[in-house]
Image (cartoon, rainbow, N blue to C red):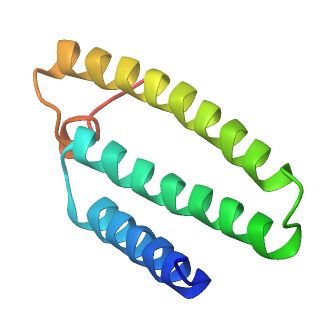
Amino acid sequence: MIPVECFFVLSALLFFIGVFGFVTRRNLIAMLISIELILNSVDINFAVFNRILYPGQFEGFFMTLFAIGVAAAETAIALAIIINVYRNYHSDQVNSIENMKF
């Protein structure tokens, strides 16, 4: 059996790698992948806390499934926005959308 602390360390590692990737990257797709890493670390925490606090119940697992569904919807919308930005500006860099005007 894997100790619970290992899952917390893995979750923290994923979270900080995601935050570092989001802050340092200027590519929109790389930033989206970093956000997905952050959301996956939260999903791991949901499952681990469910296992610790309620060993026989599945509330944390259902929250994890719900979070995965929300992340999939968020990814689909973000990819649609990135494709639209690429069609208009022929670039997927963040600085290309700074010039957007209403």
Instruction: Check the image and name the residue furthest to the left.
Output: 90
Q: Nearer the viewer, residue 2 or 8?
A: 2
Asked which quadrant contains residue 16, the reply is bottom left
Query: In the figure, is residue 99 to the left or right of 54?
Result: left
Q: Could you say where residue 95 lies in the image, as x and y percent from the top left?
A: 20, 45
Residue at position x 30%, y 25% from top? 82
Residue at position x 74%, y 49% from top? 61
Q: Nearer the viewer, residue 95 or 20?
A: 20
The vertical placement of 25 against 79, above or below, is below
Q: Could you say where residue 52 lies in the image, as x and y percent from the top left?
A: 78, 75
Instruction: Check the image and name the residue furthest to the front.
Output: 1
Where does the C terminus fall, quadrant-wise?
Answer: top left
The vertical placement of 81 against 5, above or below, is above
Query: In the figure, is residue 85 to the left or right of 7?
Result: left
Query: In the figure, is residue 35 to the left or right of 51?
Result: left
Q: Could you say where residue 50 lies in the image, as x and y percent from the top left?
A: 79, 64
The vertical placement of 19 against 36, above or below, is below
Q: Nearer the viewer, residue 54 or 69?
A: 54
Asked which quadrant contains residue 53, the reply is bottom right
Query: In the figure, is residue 15 to the left or right of 26?
Result: right
Where does the N terminus fall, quadrant-wise?
Answer: bottom right
Total marks shown come to 0
Residue at position x 52%, y 75% from top? 7
Residue at position x 88%, y 60% from top? 56
Q: Could you say where residue 73 lies in the image, as x and y percent from the top left?
A: 56, 25
